[in-house]
Every structure is written in C-alpha cells, then in structure tokens.
Amino acid sequence: MRHLASYILTRILLAIPMVFIMLTIVFVVLRVMPGDPVNAMLGAHAPQRVIDQKKEELGLNKPIMVQYVEYLGKLVRLDLGDSMIFKQKVSQPIIEKLPATIELTLFGLLVSLGIGIPLGAAAARRRRSGGDFGIRLYANVVYCIPVFWMGLLLQLFFGVWLGWFPVSGRTSPRMEASVFSKTGFYIVDTLRIGNLAAFGDVMWHLVLPSITLGVVLSGIFVRLTRANMLDVLKSDYILAARARGIPERRVVYNHGLRNALIPIVTMLGLQFSLLLAGAILTESTFSWPGMGRLLLERIYLRDYPTIQGVIVVYTLVVSAMSLLVDLLYAAIDPRVKY
Amino acid sequence: MTARFSPAAGAASALRWFSRARRKYRTEWWIMIAGILVIALIVAMTVFPHVFTKYNPNDQDAGGQMTAPSRAHIMGTDNLSRDVWARVVYGAQTILGVAIAAALLSALIGIPLGLLSGFAGGLVDRILSLVMDSVYSFPGLILAIAFAAMLGPGVINITLAVAVVYIPTYFRLVRGQTLSIKEEVYVEAARAIGARRGTILGRYVFPNVIATVVVVLSLNIADAIMTEAALSYIGLGLPAGIPDWGMDLSMGKKFLPSGTWWMITFPGLMIMLLALGFTMLGEGLAEILNPRLLEK
Amino acid sequence: MKRLLAILFVLGLALSVSSLGAQSTLVYGTTDKVTDMDPASAYDFHTWEIFQNVSAGLMAYTPGTTNLVPALATGYTVNAKGDEYTFKLRKGVKFSNGTPFNAAVVKWNIDRVAKLNGDPAALVTQYVKSVDVVDDYTVKFVLTGPLSYLPALVATPTYFPMDPSVFPVDKIVKDVGELKGGEIVALGPYRLTSFKRDEEAVFEANPNYWGKEPGIKKIIIRYFADATTMRLALEKGEIDLAFKSMNPSDVNDLMKSSKYNAVKIPGPQIRYLCFETSESVFKDKKLRQAVAALINRPEINQKVYLGQNAPLYSMIPMGMSYHTDDWKTVGDGNIAAAENILKGLGYTKDKPLTFDLWYTPSHYGDPEVNMAEVLKAQLEKTPLVRTTIKSAEWATYKQQWNNKQMPVFFLGWYPDYIDPDDYTSPFAQTEGSKGNGIFFSSKAWDDMFIMEQQTTKDSVRNSTFAKMQKMWTDEAMTVPIYQGNLYIFSKKNVTGVKIGPTLIFNYDQLKLK
C-alpha cells in the first residue's frame, strides 16, 4: 500500500510540469492575439480614461511576467481567476460544462471500444484473409472521415429523415434540465432521483453524438487490438493452450484477447486525448453544451482567463485520465512493479 | 532496419529490396500504390487545375443558383452560383499546400531537436522530453484551435497552427531511434576511429532514421489534412476568397436540410479521399519497411 | 436481452411523457445570445427582447404597432419649450418582492444608467440633463434641449426601472446569478426564473403584474449554436417557435411548408457599407461615390438572401417617416459612372484602386461571408478596383473601427427607437459618426441634425430629412444595401405572434391552442 501511495503521488507530481508547460505556452501566445477584450467589453463609445481604468482593474497594464506570476499564484490556490467578459469566476462555466463533455467523451469511448475491440480481435483471428483486409480497410477509412461530416450525415439520416433520434442538445427542451441537474452528469442525476423518463431522454440524446465520435475513432482500437492480438497469438502460452486442445474460440478470446487488452489499456490515456479533441467538433455539430463550445465562444470574445482556464482543465483531465489508466494497468498486470 | 555503411549504396539495395517486398507483401504493396495514385491525382489537380475544370472557383455566374449535379456542372453549383467541382479542384491547392507545409515544418523542427536530444542526453534531453511529452499528450486539435485563434486567419497562420501540433511526434520518433542507434556497434566503431559528433549524426544516425520518418511524414500529412479541415470548418482558418474544402463544408451544411446535398458531400468526400491516400501510402510503406515499426 | 427491452420501453415512455407537459409551456428557439442582463449595458436585440418581457417602461408600444401608449405612466405633459416632460405614474404597482414602484425608483434607475456609462448610456446622457422627483407619483425629465421623441426613448429598455434593492447601483450586472435572490426583479408580465447562458432561459408568468395576464404560463427559450440545428429542431417538434436567425434556404423551405405558421416582419433593420472618412483613401468623397455606384443590391439580395430581404435606397428604412429612395438615382451596378470617376482620378487597370473590405463573421449571422464575396465580385467587375476580403470577430472589429483600421466595412442596425434620427445621426453627426468608425464631421450636417432633433414641427423635419437624404448620395459616408425582413415560424397551434415595425416581441400575447 505504501508503494501504491507513493506511485500515485509521483504520477501526480509528474502531471504538474505538463500543466505548467501547456499553460505557459498558451499564456504567452494569448497575449499576442489581435483584438482587445477591454474594448470589446466597454464598447466603441467608451472614453480613453474609462478604458485605462478598466485595464488597470483587470491587471492588463502590468508587464507580462508579473501577470504570469500572479496567475500561477492563483492557480496554486485552485483559483482559475475571473472571466474578463462576464462577471463570473472562470471555474463557473467550466464546472457547468465539463460534465457534458466528459459524458459525451466517455460514451464515445464506449462506442469506440465496443466496435474496435471485437473487430480487431476478429481481424487478428482471420489474418490475411478477406475479412481481415475488409476490417483493416474499415479502420483506415473510418479515421479519415471528418467527424463533423459524419455528424451532419447522421443528423440528416437518423435525425431528420428517419426521425429516430434528436439532433441537438442533451435533453428535450421541455425536460427542463435545471430541475434535476445536480452534478451535471445527467446520466447520474436522473438515475439518482429515479426519473426514468428523464434518463431515457438523456440516453436518447447521447446516441447520435456518441456514435459520431466513437465510430471515427474506433479505427484506432481496431488496429491496436489487431496488432496486439497478432503478437499475443504468436506467443508460447497460446501454443501451449492450443496443444492442450482448448477450443480455438476460447484460445483467441479468453487467453488471447485478455492479454492483448493490457497494452490497449495503456493507450487509453492517449486515445482519450483524441476523443476530447473530436468532441469539440461533435459538440459544435450537435449544439452540445460542453467545454468545446465554451472554448470556441470565449475565443471569439477574447476572454483570456476563461480560455486559459479551459486549457488548464483539459490538461488536468488528460493527466487524470492518464493516471487512472496507469493505475488500472498496474492493477491488472501483476508484472508491473511500483 | 539493418544498418548501411554507405548511403550511396543504399539506393541500389533499396530497389532490390522493394521488388523483394512486392513479392512478399502483395496486399500492402497494392495499398501503397493505391495511395500513391490518389495522391498523384490530387497533386495533378493542384498543379494543373485548368485541365480538370474550365470554371473559375470564384466565378459567381458559372451557372444557376444551387443547381443539382448535371452534365454542365458535374458536382452542381453552390449558393453563390459557383461551380462546386471547380471549388473542389482549386481547393486541393489550399488543403494540400497547408498540410504538406505544416508536416514539413514540424519535421524540420522536430527532427533536429529529436536528434539533439537523443544524442546529447542528460539535462537537455530531460527538459526537451518533458516539454515535448506534455504537448504530445495534449489533444492536438485543441492546441491547433488555440494557436489558430491567436494568430488569426491566413494561410501562413493556419500552417503554423497545424505545424505546432506535430513537432512532438517527430521529436519522439527521432529521439527514440537515435537512442537505440546510439548504442549500435558501428556507432561505437565510428567514435573509436575518432569521427566527430556531427559526422556520426549526419552519416550514421540520420540515414537510418529517415526511413521511419518518411512513413510518419505520410501519416502525419493525412492527420494534418484532417486538422486543417477541422480548423476551416470551425471558421478559424482562411479568409474568404480562397476555395477551401473545410470552409465549403461549413458553408454547405446550412443548405443540407433543404436538400442541397452536393455542397457538402463532395468536399467531405475529397477530404476523406486525400487523407486516405496518404494513410494508405504510409500504412503500406510501414508494413513493407517493417511490420512492427509503427506499433504504438 | 430483457434489459434491452426494458430500456426501450422506458424510452418509449419517455417519448410519450415528454410530449404531455406541452400544453401550458412554449419552447422558443433562437440563435441569438444574451449579453449583459442589465439595461444599463445591454444594447442588443435579444437582451432587449428579454427586458421587454420581464420589465416595463413608462411608455410602451401597443403590440404589433407603432402607437405609443402610457404603460407604467398614466400620461405626460410637455412644457412650452419642449425640454421638460412630466410623467404621472401608475399607482399601486409593486415589484414582485414588495418594493413599491414610484418616482424615486424611476430617478434611481436613470441616474444609474448615466453613471455606469455602458453601451446604451448615450440614449440617456445625450438627451436627459436630470430627472427630478416632484412627488411619489410624478417625475420630471429635464432635457438638454427641446426633443420631440422622448416618449419613444422611455419605451426603450435602457429606461426601464429595475428594483433598486436587487440591482447594484455601482456595477453592471452580467449574469442573473449576481442579483440578490438570483432573479431579475422588475415590472413586466414575466419573471425570468432560470438562466443557463447559451442553453436555456425559463420565464414564468408574473403573479404581481399590473397589466393583463399572459396567455402562456411558462416560456422556455432554447439557445442554439447554429441555425441549421434550430431548423431541424423545429421540424422535429423539439421547439414550438423559431425566431432569429434562420438561414435563407431554411426560410424558403419553411414558408413553403404547410405545417407551420409563418410570419414575415418587414422590419426596420438595415445593412449598409461604411467608409472611414477621415484618414483612409476614402476621405475623398468621390471615391466613396464610385464604390457606392458599383453595388448591385438586387443581386446581393438574390444571391445571398435568396430574395428574402428588400434592396434599400436610403439610410432611413422604408415604412418610416420621411423615407425617400434617393440612391436610386445612382443605380445598381453602375459600372460606367464608377469608371468615370475613377478614370478621372487617375486609376487605371494597372494601377487600380485597392483596399481591404472587412466583414465580421458571426455577429450578423452566417450569410455575412457570402455578402462580402458577392460584393467583392461586384466591385471587381471593373478592372479599376481590386479588393481583399478580410474578417475579424466582433470584439476585434469594434476595436478596429475605433482605431480607423478598416477603410471599408459592413455594419448593421436595429432601431433603438423608432425615428429617422436613429438611422442618420449615429453615422453622420460628428459624435455618433466617431463612435461607429466613420469619423465624418461637417458643421452643415450637424446643424441639420440639431434642427430636426429639436423641432416638433413635422414640416420642418420633413424638409430637413429630404435634404439630408439627397446630400447622402453625394457624401456617401455610408451606403445602404438592404432592409431586412424577420421571419418567425411556429407550430400551427401557436397564435398571437404580434411583432410590428418596432420589432418588439411581446411574449404575453402568445397563445397555445
């Protein structure tokens, strides 16, 4: 247990430089952006004196290094600062919208895995056959489909022409989300209060966006699974299992796949990043009120603190996911020493 | 990959080895060829657009407004009466140009840094690796969005924004290779005979790294294509007046529910096709050069 | 398998249940955004619409018309000079938390708007010198000079009284959450009970309303990121009503469809081209005239808006008093006239007039980039003009026009108050022109404006505006392009959509059948 605790601590400590670096990069370049948020806030008619006053109030007239150090100081106290455009703490819209993105990304991941792993395993089994080729073709083609294009087509086919699914938002407008929303994770919220109708509504709204996100990224898992499976299927213990007369199906899935999955787990962290990125485009297409949309809107408004805050949070999420994945990996593979 | 002492002899042996590969890796070979053909076709569109279409992509009187594909306009016309096929053909210049330029730029920055880092080791290596790993694990598109927003619209800006994302890819690849090659016997031998560090880097390490780089470059261009399309789709890419597939897709989606399917179908297909072309090239090459090379 | 069936059953139930609560609730979709929840700062169409429904003013327009009638006031008198208006206030009106409405509240609010000096503050500070409390139910506005249209001004949300015990007097409220109790407390037919920025706003009927009760008890506004998704949502029945801003192709389809009520509102919102007249190459009015002559309004209307708007030949919109079509004398796409001027000034094919043409991508809706592209093609029909299209997001756009960085740029205008002065002085009077990046200044013009602002004689205003519009084609500091129509689509069972030339959308008039 002592080892585990120090392992976790080390990993957390390693995440800090990453946050720091990403933050610095964005902080510096943000200051180079054309467009002045103060002007945007006060409007075209404001006299110079008022503009200067506002700049001072927001601390924008201090030298960059000073602003930077102040920001870092706040960050250490877990204060992401105040929005420059709206009267709110940066953390407020982030706390509101992060669950939406996480929910979407998680379901997208589920879809990716659900499609990718079985297909990858099947391809490995049928190596060099037509099926293998077809599945690999699928994997490559699907990754080249622009996420937003797929989203549009799905919206049109299944949302409008067939009318089976909604095309926007997390809930139906009449199902006032503010009523049941507690954590922001609607799946959890609706189940907690036992509102099955709302739960169904939320799930229903998740279908098209998750499929959009998941299918495009399933190709990666197909390839990963297949590659790992191929490795594993060549190994000695598989040979031994076959020699013992275990049916091929069990050899492949029980012995082979289980071991092949371990490396996949290590890649989950990285793939989660891809999913987060794809989620921005999905959110844009489906009017999903998540961090991606928040980022885009605040970029247009030149709301520096919120943009920085969003990037910091993305970094934290990615690090957290990495950490989780590493822990998971350590848990399932007894060979890993910590 | 086995080492070669003289890069000059490499060409001849590469040729021999390609034909051996073709016999052995039939499918992968054809995949690669297919990729090359697609790329060649689109490059042709870029260089000789007038061969493919007689219309100007900005001509707002090419035909009727939003007419469906027909003999006169094989991909129909858009909402400003411009010929869609013409916009597709000329749009190739933009997306291909940006993607290749961005990939090359990333490589140009990432490779030397990777060589340096892998070769030098120590603190330099540790710091560079840390920075690169941080950027690498961060969602690439988000970084590109942030940079594109900061730099503003423009072809050069969008190239820079896309390039930034892939620098760590080359860095890590080359660094890894450098680290392993550094330990090879022939490098030790070179050191023993007193070869200078630069010579070792340039003559022994670099040529062996190059093969992998070509594969990664190809796949990278495919990725850069998708990133560029995404940026223009969001509206952070290019100013109006330059035909661009991503922007046309974003413009066309407004007319989709009205039944004007051709405005988004073709640009979307082209993005997919071009990305697929480079992917196939990269994948084919990878399997042929070393089936386990890109296992990530 | 059984689990799957159970889930499907629940989904089916959810579908049927979600359509049950529809009767007394209306869902309204829009792509507009709320800016600041504060009349001292809000200066955009949608936020004003919200204030029109959760608060009220001393005067108001009868829904769907341009008739001003007393609302929170019961009447007013004007002194002989025309620079003092005395309003008598309605008695017995209370805010929803019990605070009484009286003259002190009116004064407090006007003073606050002036002090905070937000975007719309000029609507107050330019005209009102002070507000005096005569007694609890009588308030006097002392103006900076004689003014004919103060009643129209007090009908704008900038003048609407908010509850002093809830609104902070010294800062601008951006979000509802900042207010005491987390709710806007005012005097309108609805209360804003919930607000999630960019997602939804929920309105419920105000039980303390001094006027007639609204027809629909609950209204939910659903905010959409783009118009296409909104159209699809309407078609799927997810929303009952869609207003602002639809894509032209969607408007066409929905107008043809028999499933929706379509209301077309010819509105006084205009789009026009602006020139920076003090330092750019366009300080020469002849060049402005040349560019203006090249504009082909019907083509822009057809290509970009599929014919849904109306070409406009004066800065004063059609349907408003004193409008004359003076720009028709210049014509559309008058290449000959333009080339005449340009050749006369020495421009040739090898040395054309080159400049940047600016637009802002999202503030005015999606077709904006198309308008820029079409205009560029029109301007370049003569080889003597070459332009480059550039764009900047609204924040940067505003900054750039202040810094004189854009020689030619598009702008749009929704009326603050219904008067031709609102369509002319912000662009051609020295103060206003500066604020809009045009920097035009001429004593002759300023005198004309003072004349029409201060007189109450219709004949004087008529002749002044007639002269002004004629002179506009000569000075051409702005060139009108089109006048917009607004479209509202609603399900067949929604009635009571009464939006007139004021473009005010009164939710309390809506009814569900």
Image: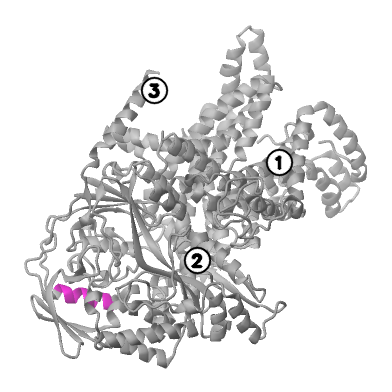
Does residue C112 belong to the magenta stretch?
yes
- The x, y position of residue A92, in whole percent, is 36, 54
Left or right position of A76 against A195: right
Tags 1 and 3 on a common chain: no
Which of the numbered marks, if any, corresponds to residue B277? 1
Q: In this rendering, which labeled residue sits more in front, label 3 or label 2?
A: 2
Local secondary structure at mark 3: helix
Local secondary structure at mark 2: helix
Local secondary structure at mark 1: helix
Residue, disc 3? C4
> What amino acid type is highlighted by mark number 3?
Leu
- The x, y position of residue A325, in whole percent, is 52, 36
Does residue C488 belong to the magenta stretch?
no
Residue B25 quadrant: top right
Q: Residues within 10 Å of mark 2 (few under 14, many from 20)?
A: some
- The x, y position of residue A281, in whole percent, is 51, 47
Q: Is label 1 in contact with label 2 (beta carbons under 8 Å)?
A: no
To which chain does the residue with label 1 belong? B
Residue B113 quadrant: bottom right
Which of the numbered marks, if any, corresponds to residue C340? none
Q: Residue furthest top?
A: A245
Q: How many marks?
A: 3
Residue, disc 2? C298
- The x, y position of residue C274, in whole percent, is 49, 76
To which chain does the residue with label 2 belong? C
Query: Does residue C52 show up?
Result: yes
Tags 1 and 2 on a common chain: no
Residue toward you, C261 or A13 = C261
Q: Which residues are magenta?
A: C105-115
> What amino acid type is highlighted by mark number 1?
Gly
